[in-house]
Amino acid sequence: MSVSKLEIKEGVPLSGHTTIGVGGRARFFFSCGSVEHLRTGLLFAKEKGLRAHILGGGSNTIIADAGFDGVVLKIDLQGVRMHEEGAWLFLSAAAGEKWDELVKTCVERDAAGIECLSGIPGTVGATPIQNVGAYGQEVSETIVSLRLMDRDSLEMLEMDGRDCEFRYRQSRFKSREKDRYIITEVTYRLRRHASPEVEYPELARHLALASDLGKLEGGRASLKAVREGVIALRRKKSMVIDPSDPNSRSVGSFFLNPVLTDEELRPFQERCRKSGEKGPVSTFRMESGTKIPAAWLVEHAGFSKGYVKGGAGISTNHALAIVNCGGTAKEILALAEEIEKGVYNRFGIRLEREPVIVG
Ligand SMILES: Cc1cc2nc3c(=O)[nH]c(=O)nc-3n(C[C@H](O)[C@H](O)[C@H](O)COP(=O)(O)OP(=O)(O)OC[C@H]3O[C@@H](n4cnc5c(N)ncnc54)[C@H](O)[C@@H]3O)c2cc1C
């Protein structure tokens, strides 16, 4: 396909393509509705000697104020295929499909496995990148395969979900093979007519309190009740995108929950004890160590919800969400740095950022 058949835009403002709403312009911008569009866009970037950036829904992306002096390829591939095999529903969704629409479809079809991931913004193609997770579920539990384009050879390949090296908010696409592939389609395997397994205590409590017992099937919450419960909990924390909620002008959680090895955990506990802290009430034991709630670290380092510095602030509903209060990317990142320093000075822990910074 020649470039002329693909609409190239120049100097496109990118802030409106992200949920946090900051940042400058893209030198070139392509909306890619097919694999051929992606190839053309990558070749165009190569010919011009420019970098290419892959943009999904922009819900985990911060664009620099100076913008991106390269080619933005916006993933607009659409289409969902489904087939049933015994107890399973296999669902292959193009990378540009909206994630939450897919979750809604699955819940409506009574297929279990991703209902706790309701209300998360962004696209299907981005879900494997950081192994999207919430309320006790991660996409790694249901992804069986991916279709990808190698950005160098421009060839298409298939990858088994088990080869994606999924971990807590991690995959090979975010670590050793960062920027190597473009994901064009993801296949999920869901359980048909199965009851949801609710493991996350906050969600289980919420559902147990659900006064509308019609929402319960055989004493267990229905998929629909789980989806509604998750969205209700997320809404209270401004973790669903809502134009009328200024706290949702964010990238969701800005920092990952640190996972400490036993060697790291001891000095942390000692530090807490010496400074009179009781330590986080809810830590979580994982194979790789102990997960410490980053929100607790942030608040106990002195950054309370609602703290504002210039045009950036901490959500009044969630200590981990940095919110755009009419500011710039520079102000957002300056606040992130201030928090990181504060947490390090108090607890000796270096917070890791979740969003991708572009430009
Ligand atoms: C209010 C709010 C709540 C959130 N809650 C959660 C949550 O509970 N759990 C969670 O895990 N995340 C959460 N997030 C973060 C975010 O929604 C997810 O990470 C989401 O998967 C990002 O999707 P996106 O399409 O917007 O990705 P983008 O921000 O556009 O891109 C993110 C990264 O993925 C890459 N990428 C995107 N698409 C592709 C592709 N097709 N192929 C290759 N690379 C690609 C980009 O280059 C970039 O590096 C939240 C964000 C917000 C704003």
Image (cartoon, rainbow, N blue to C red):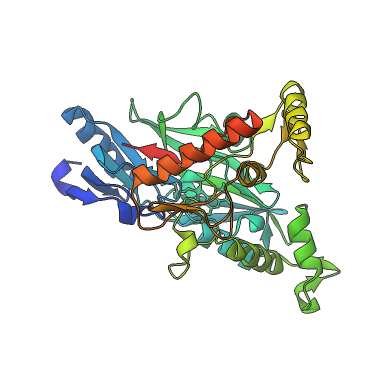
Residue 320, image x, y percentages: 57, 48
Numbered marks: total? 0
**Residue at coordinates 86% horizontally, 68% vertically from top-left?**
219
Q: Where's the N terminus, which quadrant?
A: top left
Look at the image and tell me whether residue 6 can be seen.
no
Look at the image and tell me whether residue 344 can be seen.
yes
> In the figure, is residue 311 to the left or right of 29?
right
Q: Is residue 329 above or below residue 82?
A: above
Residue 173, image x, y percentages: 49, 32
Q: Is residue 102 above or below residue 161?
A: below
Residue 187, image x, y percentages: 55, 46
Name the one closer to the observer, 300 or 94.
300
Residue extending farthest right: 219
Name the one closer to the observer, 301 or 51.
301
Residue extending farthest top: 263
Residue extending farthest left: 4
> In the figure, is residue 154 to the left or right of 136?
left
**Residue at coordinates 59% horizontally, 31% vertically from top-left?**
344
**Residue at coordinates 65% horizontally, 68% vertically from top-left?**
228
Q: Where's the C terminus, which quadrant?
A: top left
> In the figure, is residue 163 to the left or right of 56?
right
Residue 283, image x, y percentages: 76, 41
Name the one closer to the observer, 258 or 26.
258
Residue extending farthest front: 275
